[in-house]
Image (spheres, helix red, strand yellow):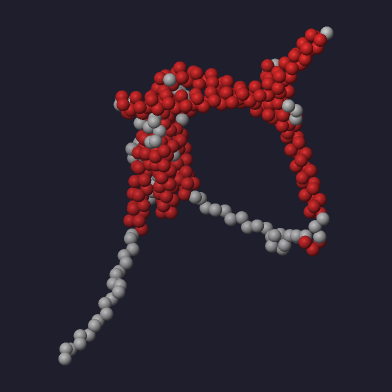
Amino acid sequence: MKSQRRLIPKKTMSQKLVLHAHPHSIRRFHIKAYQTQVASFQQAAEKMRRYVEHDQPAFTLWWQQEFAAALSGQSLLEKTLHDLQLLVDATDLYVSHKKGTHARAYALVTKAQAEGKLSQLMAEIFADIDRLKKVNAVTEEFSTQTRASRVPFEQASFPQEHDLLTPVHIVAGPTAEETTEGYIKKIYRELVRKLHPDTTASGQQNAQQKSLWHELQNAYEWRDLDRLEALFKRALGPSAEAIDFATVPIGDILAMKEEMIRKLTKLRKDMKRAKKEANWDFGARRQDKRFMKGLATSIEEELSAQTRHMESRIERYQKLIQSWIAPVKNRKQKSYRYEAQDHDSW
């Protein structure tokens, strides 16, 4: 008979000593993480600045010069379309408010336009419409109050005791964005005191001061904290520190890091959308002849499609106006024909 071995159950969980990190280590970890996010944000912001300040203006200047003739023709079509649309909208508004036929309304509108009084005519119509709205609102309010006064006493609602108590107002603490914004404004104010033109003895800035001032405004507009810190060191010396992290509470550092992550995520989404545009990195891509040829072809097709669309809308408006005027012309022609027949009978 085999001897049975005694089974010893294994421990399902090993006992480990959990070592807590030193507070200074936690602080250094989050400061490093924040600085990493700031560096990534700075790189992405630099690409977006190049796109906004260089690529977009260069692209706009190129296609305006390349397609000047087509754009000039489109501007004329846009003006014609705008004038027709204004006449049609004004005629419809006049008919809906004053009643009557479109032919009579169109004649009055065109006459007012020829005399330069179309805006005055439209202002009078809008004033009448607003006056009617106010009258209708007062009538509706009066009828509502009348219906409410007929509610039986048993169904009437009265304020309860808890409704009469003074509400408690809770003041929320600063958000992550407000915390980061506070640091940015603090640095900006210090740099303004140092770099503002009024702080100089002569009241005028030299070339270096003008460059620093322009860069300061750009960095503050983009809320680029890392760039503001670099400007702080350039303006006040390499040993100067914009933010003394030793005196910043760990909660504020965490809030700054989370806010920088949020801004970086939003900036990357904007970059993803911008990269789909033809003017992304246009300064470098314009050297590629194949890319420029394809870009020119696509713009020509888009301009042609826009031109056809505007021409079709102009044609529809013209047909609509002709349908208003045609009955009047037909009536005049019939009256002339009847007068001629009567004259022959004499």
Q: Where is residue 343 in the image (x, y as percent from the top left)?
A: 80, 9
Regarding residue 75, the answer to whether it shows in the image is yes
Q: In this view, does 143 lie above or below 83?
A: below
Residue 55 image-quadrant placement: top left
Position above or below: 221 against 123: below
In percent of the image, x 17 and y 89: which residue is there? 3
Q: Is any part of residue 209 visible from this angle?
A: no
Q: Which residue lies furthest to the bottom in this view?
A: 1
| Residue in front for this viewpoint, 69 or 164 | 69
State left or right for residue 98 relative to residue 204.
right
Q: In this view, does 302 lie above or below 137?
A: above
Residue at image position (77%, 46%) is 141
Residue 85: which quarter of the image? top right
> In the depicted view, which residue is nearer to us: 169 or 280?
280
Give residue 188's position: percent from left, percent from top. Answer: 45, 37
Residue at the front extreme, as displayed: 345
Horizontal and vertical percent position of residue 31: 36, 50
Q: What residue lies at 47% left-to-right and 37% top-to-bottom? A: 189
Q: In the rendering, at what x and y percent does residue 123 appear?
A: 71, 27
* In front of the other: 279 or 324: 324
Residue at image coords 41%, 42%:
269
Q: In this view, does 71 lie to the left or right of 39?
A: right
Q: In which quarter of the image is the C terminus?
A: top right
